[in-house]
């Protein structure tokens, strides 16, 4: 297995781990997203989007292989682009936001590189 393939696998597994944490402990995501669940409906949204969707997105390349890694990478880069716009428009230059942006760019680039 190549170094790049190992990095892709790690990114997919970390995506799943983020989803599992969000599903099992939805209140824990406040520390890295700034989102706070208000009531059962808010908890349900966090479990569904940050939990279920991230688990599915991370698992897809492991199940489907090939270009599914690139699709996950495009997802990360789309999040990074949207976050960049938000950083400019909302003046949200919190260090956690900049760390998230850098992480999304690095993960996205790793995932879209050759397959």
Image (spheres, rainbow, N blue to C red):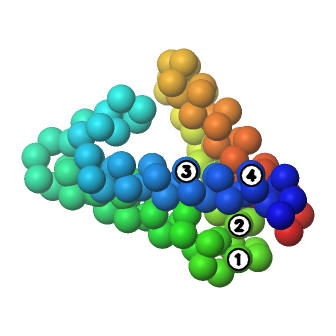
For label 3, the residue is: 14
Tell me the SS state at disc 2: helix
Q: Earlier in the sequence, mark 3 or mark 1?
A: 3
In the rendered structure, are the residues bearing label 1 and label 2 in contact, judged by CB atoms less than 8 Å apart? yes
Q: Residue at x 42, y 55 (%)?
A: 19
What is the CA distance from the residue labelled 3 to the residue labelled 4? 10 Å
What residue is pinned by disc 2?
A: 69
Query: CA separation, marks 3 and 1?
Result: 16 Å
Q: Is residue 17 above or below residue 52?
A: above
Tell me what residue is drawn at x 73 percent, y 41 percent.
106
72 in relation to 62, above or below: above
Q: For the residue carrying disc 3, how many other residues have a C-alpha within 10 Å: few (<14), some (14-19), or many (20+)?
A: some
**Mark whose residue sits in front, 2 or 3:** 3
Residue at label 4? Answer: 7
Q: Is residue 72 left or right of residue 24?
A: right
Mark closest to the chain's N terminus, 1 or 4: 4
In the rendering, at what x and y percent does residue 12 appear? 61, 59
Instruction: Say few, some or many: other residues with alpha carbon within 10 Å of mark 2 (under 14 / 14 to 19 / 20 or more).
Output: many
Residue that mark 1 sits on: 65
């Amino acid at each position: 297995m190549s170094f790049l393939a190992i990095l892709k696998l790690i990114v997919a597994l970390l995506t799943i781990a983020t989803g599992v944490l969000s599903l099992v402990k939805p209140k824990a995501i406040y520390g890295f997203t700034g989102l706070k669940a208000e009531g059962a409906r808010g908890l349900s949204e966090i479990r569904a989007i940050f939990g279920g969707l991230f688990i599915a997105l991370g698992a897809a390349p492991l199940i489907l292989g090939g270009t599914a890694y690139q699709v996950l990478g495009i997802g990360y880069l789309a999040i990074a682009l949207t976050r960049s716009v938000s950083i400019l428009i909302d003046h949200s230059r919190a260090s956690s936001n900049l760390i998230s942006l850098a992480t999304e760019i690095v993960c996205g680039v790793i995932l879209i590189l050759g397959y």
